[in-house]
Amino acid sequence: MSDALRVLVVDDEIDLAAVVISYFEREGYLVDSAVDGPSAVEKARVGLPDLIILDLMLPGFDGIEVCRQVRTFSDAYILMLTAREEEIDKIVGFAVGADDYVVKPVSPRELIARSKAILRRPRAQGSVNTSETSSSEIYFGDITLDSNSRTVTCRNQMVDLTKTEFDLLEIMMESPKSVFSRRTLLESVWGGEWYGEIHVVDVHIGHLRKKLADAGASESVVRTIRGVGYGMDLG
């Protein structure tokens, strides 16, 4: 079915991956798979999955590096699998942008249940422009954001943002004098019932900053307020 959600299963344990794939397919998902880091990134780029089941330990490069690279171009939910509970501290410490973590061994049924819980919390479809003007454009310094076309330019250069990066920037540009906590940004972009890793916000903000800086904006245009969160700053 054309509207089926896409899942990418990344695990070098072939037998386990085959079982997980069969469970997802039975639930009506379109499933692809990868067995190492480089192929996982490539399949995520080409296949545009909605959800990635990602093992931490992989040949080529590990799940942390996969997560880092995927987050530069995709907002897919990422459910990371770890062999030991202590490894969760390592994942969180790297703050790579995984949405949830599961310790192996995990039954395919539990994995499906956790996945469905994540997918029930869709990314917001973009915030509403509350400006009194009828224009869909918002300006901040050299940055122009158009909420109708969902485009961002900086110094007349198009900035290629993911959906989540765009939503975060739009929220902050609509209230440029405000400071937003991570929790506020999570509730606005990820949905009010989000229960995953709160520092996923930091990862998307980091990529947003870099893309704006590459287009000529100040690296501090999205400022960090220690102990509070984020806001806009002309520098």
Image (cartoon, rainbow, N blue to C red):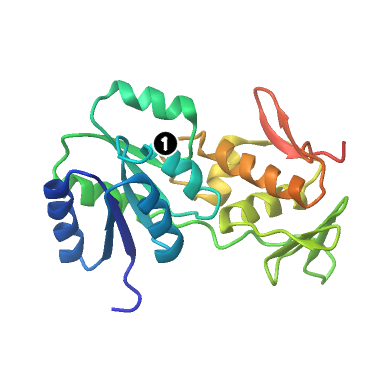
Q: Position of residue 209 (x, y in %)?
A: 70, 43
Q: Nearer the viewer, residue 92 or 148?
A: 92
Q: Residue at x 43, y 64 (%)?
A: 46
Label 1 crowding class (10 Å Cα cut-off): few <14, some 14-19, many 20+? many
Where is 47 relative to 11, above or below?
Answer: below
**Left or right of 167 in this view: 108:** left
* Residue most extreme to the bottom: 2
Q: Position of residue 114 (x, y in %)?
A: 27, 46
Task: Identify the element where label 1 is drawn.
Answer: helix
Q: Quadrant of the N terminus?
A: bottom left
Where is 229 relative to 99, above or below?
Answer: above
Q: Position of residue 230 (x, y in %)?
A: 69, 36
* Residue most extreme to the front: 60
Q: Residue at x 49, y 35 (%)?
A: 198
Instruction: Kindly indicate the quadrant of the structure image that contains residue 149.
Output: bottom right
Where is 42 relative to 177, above or below?
Answer: below
Check disc 1 and give the amino acid type.
Ile
Q: Position of residue 29 (x, y in %)?
A: 26, 66
Q: Quadrant of the C terminus?
A: top right
Where is 154 relative to 29, above or below?
Answer: above
> Number of labelled discs?
1
Q: Residue at x 52, y 33 (%)?
A: 199
Q: Which residue is mark 1?
A: 64
